[in-house]
Amino acid sequence: MIRLAVRCKPEMAERVLAELAVLVPGGVEEERGSTYVEYAIYGEPGEVPSLPALEAAAGEGLVEIETTEVPDDWGDRWRDFHKPVEVAGRLLVRPDWADVAAGADQDARERLEVVINPGQAFGTGSHATTRMCLELLVALADDGGAIGSLVDLGTGSGVLGIAAAKLGWEPVEGCDHEVAAIEAARENAAANGVRMSLRRINLREDDPPVAATVVANLTAGLLDRVAQRLEKRPAGVPERLICSGLLASELDSIADAFEAAGLGERRRLSVGEWAALLLARE
């Protein structure tokens, strides 16, 4: 097994991740330092992207590309890094091998479980942007906002759409440009026993589907594109929109973009340098 690490400048991290997502739809590992952001890809020789492709993806933000050989027992050890994630005492996102302990308290046993295995597509619940989206979904549901249709833009593994379905939204639709993500979301929805329709769309070119609630864990560039399309199509503006995938420095500009489309800011969250927004129709 090979670990291929791409280091880039922090200010270029969002753009590099977006480019890598096209090359590696199965997901990447992320590590942040004071002067760099590192994205790591795992695979057998011949399966990982070529160096020229990675250099092109990182562009002017490239700092370093490093290849290392992973120990033979990595296939067992990698599971140690994927632990259950609890959200607001209402959701437990976990891989299928991490069962709730038999001695867990009653409240823990009554949490809604979302079972997502890493490695299929982006979104296992562990990244700060995913956790914030889940937290805002829980808050909406607890306030009686889990009503009507919901669309998950950039669904990845389907974790947000699946959680929404379990919290009470119906119907739920997941959208993604990557075939691997659509397949992973379909498998995960079935494994979780929820109904979730799936559609392949390119948000750089296509209008987002109409729904009462939209959740979008995307890059700032794509969120801005969604906001522009909603501004041109007022009939498609949702009642509520949750968005993340943002750096804290990008919050104000994205909030302004959605305000122009008729969605006002209601709440913002931040974890480290990552942030999320809850917006509602004005």
Image: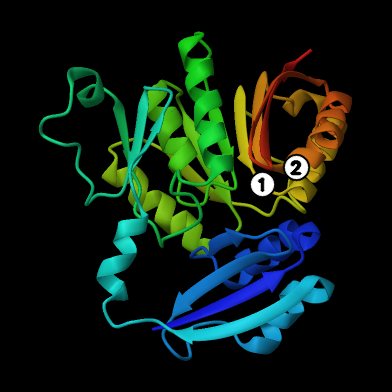
Where residue 231 appears, x then y in whole percent?
86, 31
Q: What residue sits 48% from the left and 90% below the top? A: 46
- Circle 1: residue type: Leu
- 120 lies above or below 161: below
Where residue 15 appears, x then y in whole percent?
75, 61
Where residue 281 appears, x then y in whole percent?
74, 16
Tell me if 202 is positioned left or right of 136 in this view: right
Q: What residue sits 51% from the left and 63% below the top? A: 27
Label 1 – label 2 distance at C-alpha: 6 Å
Where residue 30 appears, x then y in whole percent?
56, 60
Tell me if 263 is positioned left or right of 174 in this view: right
Asked if residue 245 shows in the view, the reply is yes
Q: Quadrant of the N terminus?
A: bottom left
Q: Nearer the viewer, residue 150 or 69?
A: 69
In the drawing, what numbered circle is on residue 223?
2
- Circle 2: residue type: Leu
What element does badge 2 sit on? helix
Seen as rendered, the residue at the extreme bottom is: 46
Asked if residue 178 shows in the view, the reply is no
Check if mark 1's residue and mark 2's residue have beta carbons within 8 Å: yes
Q: Residue 111 sits in which quadrant?
A: top left
Tell me if 113 is positioned left or right of 142 in this view: left
Residue position for label 1: 218
Q: Nearer the viewer, residue 163 or 132?
A: 132
Q: Residues within 10 Å of mark 2 (few under 14, many from 20)?
A: many
- 140 lies above or below 160: above
